[in-house]
Amino acid sequence: MSNQNRLLIIAITWAALFVLYSVNRFLLRSAFPHHFSKTVVSRVSTSSKPPGTILSKIGVLFVFVVNIATVILLLADLLSSSTNQYTAFVKVNLPLCVNVGGSILFVLDTIFGFLAMVFNPNYTPLYTTPPQEFVLATQGPYQIIRHPRYAAAAVLNLALFLFTGIWLPLLGMIGWIAIYFQSRAEENYLMTLAAKEYGEYRKRTSMFFPKLLRIHTVK
């Protein structure tokens, strides 16, 4: 697959989702996803310090940054042939079928991450202190796992490698441990803000992988 085709797929996917996000944010705020049930909670804690450590936040940002850097490298490689000598060492020749599979995974993962932002009105790249009353995101992707945006960024590390053949995003796997610790800190923080609501939600879901259906036998 050529770099031109790869960038075309990336551009179309991101452009379409940006338009949809803008329409939802500015034109349909009262319609979607607000038809879904919302859990509005009031903070019981006055703590104003966002959860997580400096290291966990840097690690999470690193996972995101290497994905963006990969797309920038791909663009630079297409616009100027002189960059080939500098980018060749981060490339691996993968079969076309792997590139196609990676492109499908990229599109699906990007849509999943987009829905996580749509269904979470409190979304920021890193967790910040919510207002006194805030919506607890439990719908859409949050109905499946508790941290869909972080999960999408982690999967994108793999998807971009398979899609582009550039191994740079695989370095983002180093930051996966930071995602875990940052997510755990955010959950502990939410438990101090809304122990009842978040505690019930946490029992129904897992952090990064959908819970398998439990089969109950009738005795």
Image (cartoon, rainbow, N blue to C red):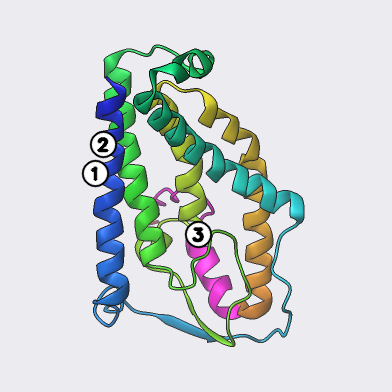
Viewer-nearest of labels 2 and 3? 2
Quadrant containing the N terminus in the rendered view: top left
Q: Please, what secondary structure does the residue beneath circle 3 have?
A: loop
Query: Which contiguous range is marked in magenta?
Result: 196-216
CA–CA distance in space, label 2 to label 1: 5 Å
Q: Residue at x 75, y 49 (%)?
A: 55
Q: Is residue 132 left or right of residue 135?
A: right
Name the residue tied to disc 3.
146
> Given the image, on which type of amino acid does mark 1 rest?
Ile
Tell me which residue sits at (66%, 42%) in the image.
Answer: 177
Tell me whether circle 2 and circle 1 mark residues in contact (CB < 8 Å).
Answer: yes
Question: What is the number of callouts on the image?
Answer: 3
The residue labelled by disc 1 is 12
> Tag 2's secondary structure?
helix
- Give the spatial CA distance, label 2 vs label 3: 29 Å
* Quarter of the rendering containing residue 131: bottom right
* Disc on the earlier residue, 2 or 3: 2
Residue 163 visible in the shown view? no
Q: Which residue is mark 2?
A: 9
Q: Nearer the viewer, residue 110 or 199?
A: 110
